[in-house]
Amino acid sequence: MIILAIYIAIFVGAYLVVRLVMSGLAKAHDFTSLKTVTFGDESAVKANTAASIISVVAVFLIWGAFTGSSLSPVHVPGPFVGDASFTYTAEAEDGSRDDATVTVRVFPVGEDVEEPEVEPGEGFAKNDAATLGAWRSTLIRVDRNDEIGKREGARVVAIDGKPIAPGETVEVASGVVTLTPKGTPNYKPAQGWQMEPIWLPPPEDVIRRIGEIAQEGYQNYTLLEHLGWSLFRVLLGFFFGALVGIPLGYAMGLSGWFRGWFEPIVEFMRPVPPLALIPLVIIWAGIGEVGKIILLFLAALWIMTIAARSGVSGVKISKVHAAYSLGASKWQILRHVIVPNSLPEIFTGARVAMGVCWGTVVAAELVAAEKGAGMMIMVASRFQLTDIVIMGIILIGVIGYGIDILMRMAERWLIPWKGRG
Amino acid sequence: MSSLLIDDVSMRFDLPDGEAVQALKNVTLNIKEGELMAVLGPSGCGKTTLLNIVAGFLAPTSGTISLGGKTVSGPGPERGMVFQQGALFEWMNVRENVAFGPNMKHMPRSESDGIVDHLLEVVGLRDFKQKAIYELSGGMQQRVALARCLANDPDVILMDEPLGALDALTREKMQGLVLKLWKETGKTIILITHSVEEALLLGERLLVMAPRPGRIHKEYRLPFAELGVGADLREVKKHPEFGPKREEILSMIWDMEEEIMGRAEEADA
């Protein structure tokens, strides 16, 4: 909630600041900036570069601020670290009371610290010492060293002078103390707003992990091998899917028998999510490479079939008629008219299929694999290695995005006539 | 002589709701080699159906089409076709589009290059040889379509409203080009149009068709096409006979449209 509020504040604040700065600069005089109607005119809406940059920076800034990152210049309050103390008041059965101090050394998780040395002090209640990792809480058995302990009928009645009963909580200088139902104080130092690395590691940890796993590897394979295997499976599955799907789509677009025969199958298989096929593929082909390739083949097959079929359906009859009138044979019509005319549709299908395949391969690797991006993050999550999980998610996203950009570049290069027919 | 003979052609097909449509009824025509015939008529008179039958895309329910004595049974390169728009192959550049017919015959590049260069010169697109189709204006695209059709050296050129989608000025220029190509190549041309003026200017013969059933209503022989070759078409329009002819044909088509409307209203009532 706090994070959302901060995010919205940055969003609005950045907008106002950028607008203020921009209004100070010289105005652009290109055609779009001279339009008076921009609300409702989609062509006049261009992504604001400053907004994009600030947006990305803001994500990393919030991430850094809430994880105490050394990369972030600002931080939200972190958890309490250092020596804290509070006093407790014990009451013996005869009604006599005595105070003693508890000193707790709170340290960042992962460091070795020694218990603080304390004097036992006067009276029947003796001073105590404890150590505690940040974000943790601990029971402090204060009566352990007392002359009159719980067994002798003494009980804790106040913390820092404030009266307390079992189940109640009292605030102390650096945290809270709760008395358990059995009467033992439980000390919980202030948590701050930052996330514990086990939930969300700071960005530099994730970056360090990338370097580390790229060199040393994780689970017997290097980072490049994990990602490469995932990509290889996708390419191979997509290749076979296209190899079968495109000719099948053409056949369905050109022959009534093929269309009648395959339409029920294609229309039935198309809405089945590839993820739903994972269990069946594992039963049939096991968890090895063959099973994954079959799964990705099935994920790409229907998409490519439908793309090729609609590519054929999309050919203008006047083009086909023109080609026949120019003396083309059926084979020449297919080769020179129908295939090139369907390329834009097939490319669109290929982009969708690659996206689906990439998603499916990660999911399949999450279920069972020896190597691959999905397997890497799944295994890491079992060991609570959140930095590897986040690193994996980021790299999966980057690769998916990269695939789409490459496909779009190839499309512009290979079919420049798309949308200009 | 390879004249085009349309012999007692009728076209009747069933609709899914059980009714039947008589698109053409007993159409007989003899178009001699080198004639330019314009076909005019209200919508639904079957003129496009007739053209598709001549092109071989449709088979008539009765009657035959023959070109130079050979019966037409399907599309063929001896009957070239120019469509209204969008029939060019946008994955090929201008040169490849024009060379399509020769390439389908596996004509060697050295030979087809000469044909393409010559035709692009004729239609005035010499400098646009390597351009992509989508970079050309509508008028230029129709010039490419004309050149592509001529590259195959057909006996008959069938034009289905080839200038229908062009603006008025471009259209007038293209009308001049059609006349010029007709005269220079001596091809037989059948041209379907919606525009009475275009039919008068281009049609050496002018066929007015009537709807329901589609049939030949009246035929004219006109002097304007000959006059228009190499001349200013606006001058032709000032010819003393041009205006009266236009009015005559316009009112004829108007009457047909009115009749259709009247019949439709009766049917509604």
Image (cartoon, rainbow, N blue to C red):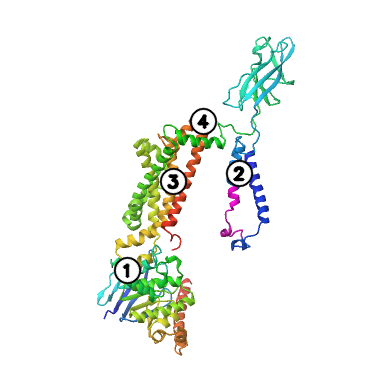
- The chain letter under disc 1 is B
Q: Counting other residues with Cα less than 10 Å from the Cα at mark 2, is it few (<14), some (14-19), or many (20 or more)?
A: some
Q: Secondary structure at mark 1?
A: helix
Q: Quadrant of residue B220?
A: bottom left
Q: Is residue A44 left or right of residue A231?
A: right
- Return the x and y of residue A181 as percentages of the image width and height: 64, 19
- Residue type pointed to by label 1: Gly
**Residue, x 48% and y 34% (percent of image)?**
A212
Give the residue pinned by disc 3: A356
Q: Nearer the viewer, residue B4 or B207?
A: B4
Give the residue pinned by disc 4: A384
- Return the x and y of residue B257 as percentages of the image width and height: 46, 77
- Kindly report the distance in space between the C-alpha atoms of the residues bearing marks 1 and 3: 41 Å
Please tell me whether mark 2 or mark 3 is closer to you in this view.
2
- Residue type pointed to by label 4: Gln
Is the residue at mark 1 from the same chain as the one at mark 3? no
